[in-house]
Amino acid sequence: MNNMNISIPEMDSLGRRWCPAPYQSAPSNSGGMLGVYLGEDEEVEWIWTFGQGGSYVSGYTVRKKPLPKVFKVGEPFDGKTDMG
């Protein structure tokens, strides 16, 4: 799958960035994903399919990135950041 010699622009015409799919061990004819374009405020969760021939990304879910917690002046801060 990942041995294909193709060229994908890092950004599309709408300014979205290209996020390549993780390495997939199944043969290229398994129908795995190459990647997806994401907006600045988006992230992707890959959906995997596992079989005897290996594993491949069979789909994805695009989600909005969680907003960082904003601390108010005087609010106790324990040094931890919970980003999701």
Image: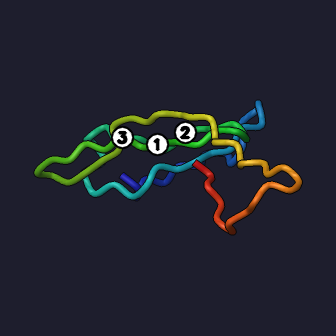
Give 77 or 8, whichever is nearer the viewer. Answer: 77
Disc number lying in front (3 or 2): 3
Give 47 or 11, whichever is nearer the viewer. Answer: 47
Mark 3 is surrounded, within 10 Å at the Cα level, by few (under 14), some (14 to 19) or many (20 or more) other residues, namely few
Going from N to C along the chain, the mark reached first, 1 or 2, is: 2
Q: Secondary structure at mark 2?
A: strand
Residue type indicated by callout 1: Glu
Q: Residue at x 46, y 42 (%)?
A: 45
Residue 46 in the figure: left or right of residue 48: right
Mark 1 is surrounded, within 10 Å at the Cα level, by few (under 14), some (14 to 19) or many (20 or more) other residues, namely few
Residue 70 x, y percent position in the rendering: 78, 48
Give 71 or 40, whichever is nearer the viewer. Answer: 71
Q: Which residue is mark 3?
A: 47
Q: CA distance from mark 3 to mark 1?
A: 7 Å
Residue 16 in the figure: left or right of residue 1: right
Q: Secondary structure at mark 3?
A: strand
Q: Which residue is mark 2?
A: 36
Residue 49 x, y percent position in the rendering: 25, 42
Q: Which residue is mark 1?
A: 45
Taking the view exactly as shown, the residue that stands out farthest to the left is: 52
Label 3 with label 2: CB-CB less than 8 Å: no
Residue type indicated by callout 2: Val
Going from N to C along the chain, the mark reached first, 3 or 2, is: 2
Q: Which mark is residue 12?
A: none
Taking the view exactly as shown, the residue that stands out farthest to the top is: 14
Residue type indicated by callout 3: Ile
Q: CA distance from mark 1 to mark 2?
A: 11 Å
